[in-house]
Amino acid sequence: MAGGVWTTQNKVRPGIYINFVNDAGSLGAMGERGTAAIGLPLSWGPAKQMLQIHAGENVKDVLGYDISSQRLLLVREALKRASTLLLYRLNAGTKASAAIGALTVTAAHGGVRGNDLTVIVQANIDDDTKFDVTTVLDGDAVETQTVSHVDELKPNRWVGFSGTGTLTPSAGAALTGGDDGSATNADHTDFLAALELEEFQTVALSATDNTLKGVYSAFARRLRESEGKMIQAVLENYPLADHEGVISVKNGVVLSDGTSLTAAQATAWVAGATSAAGVSESLTFQSYDDAVDALPRYTNSQTIAALEAGEFVFTASNGRVIVEQDINSLTSFGGDKGKAFRKNRVIRVLDGIGNDVKRIFEQYYLGKVNNNADGRNMLKSEIVTYLTGLQDANAIQNFDAQSDIAVLQGIDSDSVTVEASIQPVDSVEKIYMKVKVK
């Protein structure tokens, strides 16, 4: 087997090429954040597929509507903060269709958006043996094909064509029969099964069904505790989860255009904002983008009760809406989890450490490095580099590379134990002032 050191990744022979370095810009870099996930019933688009939607991109060709449409309200809310949204269409729906003589036109996807499509067939002005077949969406032509016979037509992103024979002229045949259908709990289960294979930070549930809340809560627990995948689920009114992996949204908001969002709908924004928040950032007192009121508003005593119950609350403040406190649903403190674990900023630091160290180990050390003093010191050096980067980013504090980290031989010959003392930095949220008057 080949080996040695490497400068660029251009080796030809299989082997292990390792540079023994201690560079803050090497393997121990912080992983990127900003990916949220949500499964939604939609009126257009590929069903039962994980779509990757990036903030700012044109989604009309994929989702059938402009991002400003009310049909994509929750997609828009999630992308106010998230850089990437893993979107899964839960429902398949029924495809709209139309018959024009020997030609049958069928929408590319199920859903009511198909009913906004029309197909025009008219003689070509330059060649009277051919026809122009134009697909129209909401009055705008989206594609035209010039053919002589039905079977020459090719599908486009909006419709498919079938049939044989001669085309029949039509001033405009509207597609009908498109229906959204509905999403079942089984569809959510399929979504979570597909999502487990992806890299993400948060997943939102915009439904109010308690059975589904339990499913999503269990999903977050399992990924965190059994799979080592540190993610959070964002649910509405589910403080009984009592877990740092579940954020329970108490209330909704009113947007500047008058649109009211329930707590269930507001989970999309919370998931997006939480996924995008850095390890040294808290959402406490941050504004909900474009929101002007909380729905409903809560009194001081009601807000205190909600916070003590582990709920994520929105508060109206001078014409805007702020996050009262960036917390999760954990309220049972004790044992290995103290009060700091209810703070999402702290959890982001701890989750980042868990995810990144796992990634570094799997990519660069697992099965590649000897489990001896030299190999363990190399792993320790990488973890020190990583944690020093977190300290430089104000995510942790008081880290001492000499006393706060130890990489030891485990019980088995192929195991390693890492012991680390970490002090996450929290945000200043309370100021107690005493003023003496002389």
Image: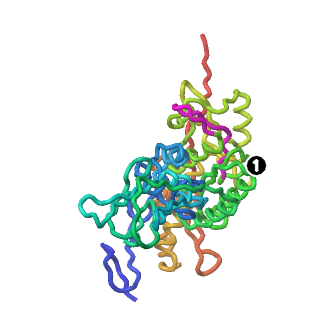
Q: Which amino acid does label 1 sit on?
A: Leu
From the viewer's perspective, tell me whether residue 161 is left or right of residue 339. left
Q: Does any portion of residue 427 appear in the rendered image?
A: yes
Residue 189 versus residue 125: which sits nearer the camera?
125
Magenta stretch prevailing secondary structure: strand
Residue most toward the left? 126
Vertical order, 293 against 420 (above or below): above
Q: Position of residue 188 (x, y in %)?
A: 65, 60
Q: What residue is shown with label 1?
A: 240
Q: Quadrant of the N terminus?
A: bottom left
In this picture, which residue range is highlighted in magenta?
246-261
Q: Position of residue 198 (x, y in %)?
A: 54, 64
Residue depicted at 44% across the width and 73% down the height: 164
Residue most toward the top? 438
Q: Position of residue 4 (x, y in %)?
A: 35, 81
Q: Position of residue 357 (x, y in %)?
A: 52, 64
Callout 1: SS: helix
From the viewer's perspective, tell me whether residue 122 is left or right of residue 317. left
Residue 182 versus residue 413: which sits nearer the camera?
182
Q: In which quarter of the image is the C terminus?
A: top right
